[in-house]
Amino acid sequence: MRKMFLAMIASSVAIGWASLALACGNHLQVLVLTAIADYPANPAPIEELRAEGPAALDELFKLRDQLTARIVAEGQRLKDNAEEGQRVAELERRISRLDRIIDQVGMQRYCSRSRLYWYTDLNKALEAARASGKPVLSLRMLGNLNEDFSCANSRFFRTTLYANDEVSKTLRENFVLHWQSVRPVPKVTIDFGDGRKLERTITGNSAHYILTPDAEVVDCLPGLYGPKAFLRKINEDLSLAKQVMALSPNDRGTKLAEFHTQQVSLLSQEFARDLARAGGTPELNSLTPEPAQGRQLPAAAPPANVAAGIARPKARIESRLIAAALPLTADPATLEDDAVWQRSAALHGEDA
């Protein structure tokens, strides 16, 4: 009876807040408070809240922060009082229900941690981007971001990437967010034969696309990124997107071609440097010099890596010096030594 009485009080308070908000003419607050008062007896007005966009999520978090503050205050002051302890427990249950609503409104599992609002309709995302002047970050994935069993990459994003405070803040302030399921995620079920079953996803991939408000692709971030690497890359792409958005349609293609040509060169150089540091310098004939812009090297003056390869014994000695002196590139597809890959990956451990 006591629990029921406390729950009735909590619901009455929420309904009272809703009535007050209605009297003040705040439609969004009415939706939020009504959702909390009615849930789970009646369905929360998720679609109406979704239609309000990120502003609805902001209101939900204001309420969540208020409830959390009350738990902290009352928990410290009344922790030895059994009856008041039940009141704190009721507040915690209400926050748990609120978190489920937040997940549905934000359309992301663990949205209560990331505080990110995701569009699932690309046209609406582009419309919001045009209104705000922000680029779109569009996640393409297997499964659904608001469900437990989405692809492994998206589960990592929800728990490690989007939940990172700096990543969350950067995404909220600078991008309109959108996700799209490309297809259902493959699953496997293990039946133990005694009524127990284990269900898991078995594969999946993902890609984050940076789009202008008119849906032009600026860049793509395929696969997994740790928070530091992701922040570095999206900040770089944010700057690029703003530059591209300021250009005429005729000039955008040139800008993007220049940027991505430069990126190919930089990535190749970084890979060669990592390979040398990891002790896996490849054969010299697998290294090629970065061509000088607009000119061909004469046949009579081969680059140092080609010349050194003629004398095989000393090429082994000179390879690291040449790799350090020239902007050489190596093909990752030719590297099959797992130990070298592990040492190379360890060089970027902080990014993960």
Image (cartoon, rainbow, N blue to C red):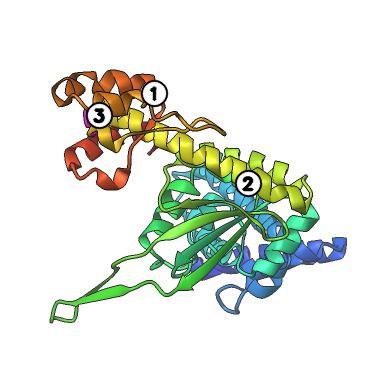
Classify mark 3: residues with Cα within 10 Å, few (<14), some (14-19) or many (20+): some
Magenta residues?
A: 278-282
Q: CA distance from mark 3 to mark 1?
A: 18 Å
Return the disc, 2 or 3, that comes first in the chain's sequence.
2
x and y percent of residue 191 in the render?
Answer: 18, 79
Location of residue 93 with respect to 1 vertically, above or below: above
> Which of the pair 202/68 is nearer the observer?
202
* Residue contact between numbered discs 2 and 1, judged by CB atoms under 8 Å: no
Q: CA distance from mark 2 to mark 3?
A: 32 Å
Classify mark 1: residues with Cα within 10 Å, few (<14), some (14-19) or many (20+): some
Location of residue 329 with respect to 197 vertically, above or below: above
- Residue 326 numbered mark, or none: 1
Residue at (41% x, 53% y) in the render: 223
* Residue contact between numbered discs 2 and 3, judged by CB atoms under 8 Å: no
Residue at (60% x, 79% y) in the render: 42
Left or right of 156 on screen, residue 30:
right
x and y percent of residue 348 in the render?
Answer: 35, 33
Q: Quadrant of residue 304?
A: top left
* Residue contact between numbered discs 3 and 1, judged by CB atoms under 8 Å: no
- Residue 256 numbered mark, or none: 2
The amino acid on which the numbered mark 2 sits, given as a three-letter code, is Leu
Disc 3 designates what residue? 278
The amino acid on which the numbered mark 1 sits, given as a three-letter code, is Leu
x and y percent of residue 8 in the render?
Answer: 60, 69
Q: Nearer the viewer, mark 3 or mark 1?
A: 1
